Each structure stands twice: as C-alpha cells, then as structure tokens.
Amino acid sequence: MSAPYNAPSPYQTPEPKRRKPWTAIIGLLLSLIALVLLAIGGWQTYTSVTDLSGAERYTGSHTVSMEAGETQMVWASSSDVRCEASGPQGAVQDSSPGDFSVEVNGERLEQVLMVQATEAGDYTIACNGEFVLGDGISVGGSLLMLAGGALCCLGFVVMVIGLIIWLVRRNKR
C-alpha cells in the first residue's frame, strides 16, 4: 500500500520549531518592573521635596507639636546654620542618618537636624539662622529608585543577550 499523497516523505527531516526569544522577553519584563519601581520611588521623593517649597521659614526658635514616632527635618540654606531641639524630656539628639541636600525653587537646602519624637508633646527647635521644617526626603522612595535603576540595567543586559542568542539561532536555520 502506498502512502497518502500529502504525507511527508519519511526521508525528510521536519522543520525545526520556531522558538520564542524567552530570554529577551524576561529582560523586557524586568525592565518594565524596574520602570514601575522608578516611577513609584520618584513620585515619593518628588512629593516629599515639593512639600518644602511652600514651607514657612523661621528664625530663632519655633515650637511644633509632634506625636510619638513622628519625625521632622530641619533644613537651612547654609550648612553653617546650627540647630538644637528640646522636647518634653529635655534635649533631643540629632537622629539624622546622614547629610542630605535638595534643591527647591532654585535654592539649595541642607539638612541640619532631624528630630524624632520619642513621646507626644511640644518640641522647640532653635537655630542661629533661617530654617524650614519638613518631613524630609522619602528614604523608601530613594531606595525604590535605586533598586529600580539596578533592575533596569540588569533587565536591559538580559534583553540584549536574549535577542543576540535568538537571532543567532534563527539565522542558523
């Protein structure tokens, strides 16, 4: 009995399956996730910095009511400004994790003090120059932007390598 007319010859090798460029697709997905992280972190950082633009400026001393665990950062246009704070229990130590500076409306503001309330009450902040009170820079937003930037770089490299592998395999056929 003979083979049907449209049947492939037993001597022909079947056409290889076309593979999708999975490595490149994974790299693209990593890059998209990174862009989302960058956008969220950027928005958090942007909103915390823009809050400083409309903040009232003080000279001498100013008293602010704070809840336990609340944080206020003291910003000045010069790093020469020195500040100290006192609360319901007396003097409050600077709990700043480091030096920060931001540019708001063309003016550079330096962080000179960070006050973290250990208990609810009135806290007095005294400085030898003009200062602004604000919530400060969102550390979480900054970390999200850092992670997003690193993930974006990784995703781009994986995507390029995946495209190269896919194109080389495709051209061998």
Image: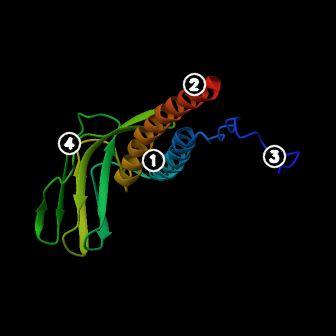
Left or right, 84 with reference to 163 = left
Instruction: Assess disc 4: are there few (<14), some (14-19) or many (≥20) residues with their C-alpha within 10 Å of its C-alpha.
Output: some
Q: Which residue, as the protein is rendered here, is positioned at the far right?
A: 5
Q: Position of residue 126 (x, y in %)?
A: 23, 53
Q: Which residue is the site of mark 1?
A: 49
Of the image marks 3 and 1, the number of the one nearer the N terminus: 3
Image quadrant where residue 11 sits:
top right
Of the residues tagged 3 and 1, which is closer to the observer?
3
**Amino acid type of the residue that numbered disc 3 sits on in the rendered structure:** Ala
Who's the residue at 51% across and 37% down the image? 105
Of the image marks 4 and 2, the number of the one nearer the N terminus: 4
Q: Position of residue 9 (x, y in %)?
A: 76, 39
Who's the residue at 29% across and 61% down the image? 71
**Amino acid type of the residue that numbered disc 1 sits on in the rendered structure:** Val
11 is higher (above) or lower (below) than 93: above
Which is more toward the observer, 35 or 87?
35
